[in-house]
Image (cartoon, helix red, strand yellow):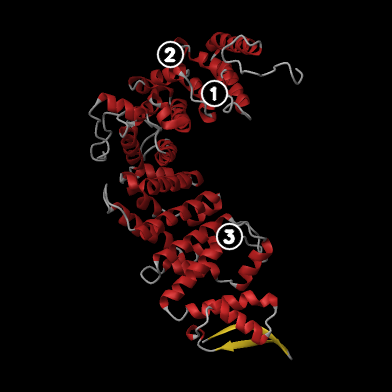
Amino acid sequence: GGEGATTSGPVGLQPVAVADVHKLPQDPHELCAKLIQEHGIPCEHRFSLLSRIRVCRSFATLEGRQFSTRVRLLALYVLLQSNVEHEELQTLFDNEPELVNELLEIIRGEGKVLVGLRTLALRILAAAVFDRTRLSNHQSVQTTVLEALGAGQYAGLLPNLLQKSVDLLTATGPDGDLAPGVSKFLESLLSFIATVVQSSNQCGSTIYDSTFLPILLPLLSHTNPKHITFVSTGICILEAFMDHNQEVARQLREMAGLKRMVARLHTELSVGGVVSHPVDDSLASPLSHPIDSAAAQEEAAQEVLPYHRRLMLKHLLRAMSQVANFALPGEATVRPLQGDGAGIPACLCAIFQRPKRYGGIIFSVASQIMTEILNQDPLCFNQLEEAGLPRVYLETLSTGVLPVYDTLCSIPPTLMALCLNKRGKQRVQESGVLECLVPIFTTPQYLKALQNDTPAVMGGGIDELLRHVSDLRKPCVASIMDIFVRIVEIGEGKHDDAPEGLDWGAGGS
């Protein structure tokens, strides 16, 4: 049997005892109405009574108990996602001081707890990590979760779960798939780890364990297209670890992480038939086969890459950039394009050749990588020149810059890095690339990208470029004058790009 709610009596509130609730013929609402009428339950206690009746009826069977637990977990997840009031959150943790530990016990219950319940518990903890509400003990909900994860009994929980999940994932091969429940659990596990690492520097340092690195690295070689989200989140975790601790990048370099990243980048770019020579045959993917027809190759190269692949490429490029900036043991200086990084120029060149396929953000990240390489060692220009990288980059800008904030702001620093080398500066001067500024500031397609602080950032970058490279002052001033002339023509309605029906004289000067 079980208890219902409470009722008023001569000495105050009294318990209402009902035996064998699960055997009664009435449904929960009918039974609740009957008890309210018989015992005069006050309004403020009626919902609690109905809730207890439901729990009592569900606990008679295993399936009922599992269903009731799922409902409670979903309710808690919704609560944490609803920007809950501080008082309600305080009441919850006052009544359930062991809530976080109980959730971790559910997650740890492999083989004993349904995988769906473990997935919900992970999602609840991920939502709790985002909540920085201060409780009465001067700890935030986030800190409460982190301290529980750092406790002795749960210290190795996340690496162990991640190792088992990644092993299952990589065992599926290039065409297999995981069971739906296992797939959702792995997605929630990776998302929870990524949330903890990205939320703050303290969080990343709290859960960091060097065992994460060898667990996540095999994901770079997993080319199953159905699991692209898992790979992307895994790379995102590696990137976040490196943001908080530079030693992680050094460890990844020593573990051949750069080699794996370059090989995976080559694989992703080869899907469109752009890169034709594999970086390392031992790490090459079955996806990196050449496309038979030249027409089919060009058509595939022009298609916009799906969002999940673009997201993975962005994280992969950023992570690769950080790992490449560390020298191996025994090396006196950083040589990012030697050894494992020899394939970087060809991959960057492929991105510059197809800017519309990969998008403005990936184009800007690739530009930043080339800038960092040249800033570290201007003598690397010869290797970049052999790969055709400066030429392709300048031709792409001259053809038309993507109207994306990141792409526009990356132009001045990249040109400045190219001009650090005498041949690079000559390339920039001969290309007339600064003429690309004219359509950027005078055509409608760039209006949205030029909102907010974009003009100020670009102007500051151009000013810096001209102060360091005086030879570019004359062509740059000429382009700026063309911009003003074009704007005047638009204002007078003499230019084809002049917006129709726009009164330039209205609203003052």
Q: Mark 2 points at which residue?
A: 427
Between label 3 and label 2, give the one nearer the viewer: 3
Q: Is residue 469 above or below residue 6?
A: above
Q: Give the amino acid at mark 1.
A: Gln
Instruction: Single out the mark in the foreground, 1 or 2.
Output: 1
Whether residues under marks 1 and 2 lie with C-beta atoms below 8 angstroms apart, the answer is no
State the image quarter where residue 426 is shown: top left
Q: Which residue occupies the foreground of this view, 458 or 5?
A: 5
> Label 2 sits on what residue type?
Arg
Circle 3 packing at 10 Å, graded few (<14), some (14-19), many (20+), is some
Q: For this rendering, which residue is in front, 120 or 63?
A: 63
For the residues marked 3 and 2, what is the alpha-carbon distance in whole angstroms?
56 Å
Residue receiving disc 3: 80
* Residue drawn 66% across the image and 86% down it: 39
Q: In this view, does 102 lie above or below 349?
A: below
Secondary structure at badge 2 equals helix
| Mark before the other along the chain sequence, 3 or 2 | 3
Q: Nearer the viewer, mark 1 or mark 3?
A: 1
Q: How far apart are marks 1 and 2 (CA)?
A: 28 Å
Residue found at x 52% / y 85%: 21
Depicted 177 relative to depicted 351: above or below:
below
Q: Distance between the residues labelled 1 and 3?
A: 41 Å
Q: Where is residue 116 in the image (x, y as percent from the top left)?
A: 42, 64
Observer able to see residue 5: no
Foreground residue among 380 and 145: 145
Residue type at numbered disc 3: Leu
